[in-house]
Image (cartoon, rainbow, N blue to C red):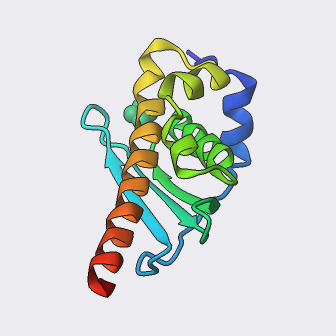
Amino acid sequence: PRRFYHPNVIDHYERPRNVGLLDKKSSSVGTGLVGAPACGDVMQLQVDVDENGRIRDAKFKTFGCGSAIASSSLATEWIIGKSLDEAAAIKNSDIAKELCLPPVKLHCSMLAEEAIKKALSDYEKKQAALKAASA
Ligand code: FES
């Protein structure tokens, strides 16, 4: 049987925004890599943060289902231009709502929330290490 997907999912799945990689080694880049044990899908999301603490760019690579790809695509769109705190406040339920994900697909949006949080904490760790090194 053909699964029903909301047009918002199909749009992000067919024309994913911000697919790609940022330089992992750059001190302004944070990388979050997460996996869903249930289905084995993997998502990498990266942020590039400017001097004022704003996310100036974000990229993702997702090896997973259509909902995971759509969730990460939407997540990158939402976080570009945001402060770290604003990005950290994005909830998987917001993503699921925007994409009208059915209950069995909620964990796909969960991946996106986790990937954002991991990318932000990776960036913060790098900054803390830099500060410690220059202190
Ligand atoms: Fe597992 Fe979508 S089915 S991430």
Q: Which sits in the foreground, 11 or 79?
A: 79
User: Which residue appears at 33% of the width and 86% of the height?
Assistant: 134
User: Which residue appears at 60% of the width and 39% of the height?
Assistant: 70
Q: Which sits in the foreground, 108 or 40?
A: 108
Residue farthest to the bottom?
134
Relative to 34, does residue 91 appear above or below in the rendering? Answer: above
Count of residue discs: 0
Residue 40 place in picture, x, y as percent: 30, 42
Q: Is residue 112 left or right of residue 20?
A: left
Quadrant of the displayed image that contains ligand 1: top left
Residue 50 place in picture, x, y as percent: 61, 69
Residue farthest to the front?
135
User: Which residue appears at 66% of the width and 43% of the height?
Assistant: 78
Name the quadrant of the N terminus: top right
Q: Which sits in the foreground, 110 or 126?
A: 126
Residue 124 place in picture, x, y as percent: 38, 62
Relative to 89, does residue 49 appear above or below in the rendering? Answer: below
User: Which residue appears at 56% of the width and 20% of the height?
Assistant: 101
Name the quadrant of the C terminus: bottom left
Residue 34 place in picture, x, y as percent: 34, 48
Q: Quadrant of residue 110?
A: top left
Q: Is residue 122 left or right of residue 53?
A: left
Q: Which sits in the foreground, 114 or 126?
A: 126
